[in-house]
Image (cartoon, rainbow, N blue to C red):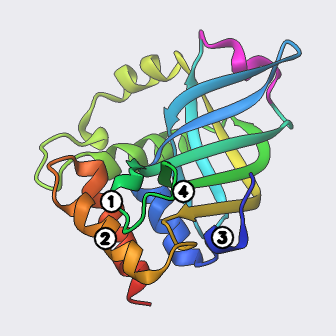
Amino acid sequence: MYIPKHFKLDDEEMIYDFIEKYSFATLFSQHNGEPYATHLPLTLNKGESTLYGHFARQNEQWKDIENQQVLVVFQGPHCYISPSWYETMKAVPTWNYVSIHIYGKMEIVEDKKVIFDSLNDMVNKYENQDSPYNLNNVDSKFIEGMSKGIVAFRINISKIEAKAKLSQNHPMERQELIIKQLENTSQQENIQVASLMRKNLQK
């Protein structure tokens, strides 16, 4: 990923937080000699430096993916930045965003306990704390039958690239103007980007 020095994100905890928060990712590999992508949720195991997930078994991407070096893209909040918000008209539009690229070796998981634990972690991550649903309470034979329809995997992380393009290359006064415009909308993406910009200014 192209990352100018202004936009390089080095804070490991912030990177992990983004991966946890924006965990619906895009997984790229080579399949039948061509680039191929699947959109899917992934869970991060920081202690292992791994990502866990699963394909639908009918998605043939898994058939030639083992031991490939794959790319996973996590896309954070993003929005259009209008030059009309600046103090000058000598400017052009741009786009602010946060994006994290993870590279790693793909490993197909067949151990039933590891598969169940990874599914359970995913359910617990997305279910509300007061949800009555618990994978441990679902009939084990039903879970085993449903598990036959998936292919679980683990990605052993080898490299992380993170980019936060938040107008850091503009003067502070201009960044404040952008933040005010973004905050003055009802669009959640704009508000999230404004919040990130404000945190960046306060460092």
Label 4 or label 3, whichever comes before in sequence order? 3
Residue type highlighted by circle 2: Leu
Residue 177 marker: 2
Q: Is residue 86 above or below residue 55?
A: below
Q: Please name the residue that numbered disc 1 is placed on.
A: 85
Reading the image, the residue beneath label 4 is: 44
SS for dot 3: loop
Residue drawn at point x = 46 percent, y = 61 percent: 18
Residue 71, percent from left and from top: 73, 42
Residue range highlighted in magenta:
58-65
Nearer to us of marks 4 and 2 is 2
Rendered residue at 38%/69% (across/down) = 196
Task: Identify the secondary structure beneath mark 1.
Answer: helix
C-alpha distance separating marks 1 and 2: 6 Å
In front here: 15 or 180? 180
**Image point 58% across, 79% down: which residue?**
11
Q: Are marks 4 and 2 in contact (CB under 8 Å)?
A: no
In 3D space, how far apart are the residues under numbered discs 4 and 2 (Cα atoms)?
36 Å
Q: Is residue 167 magenta?
A: no
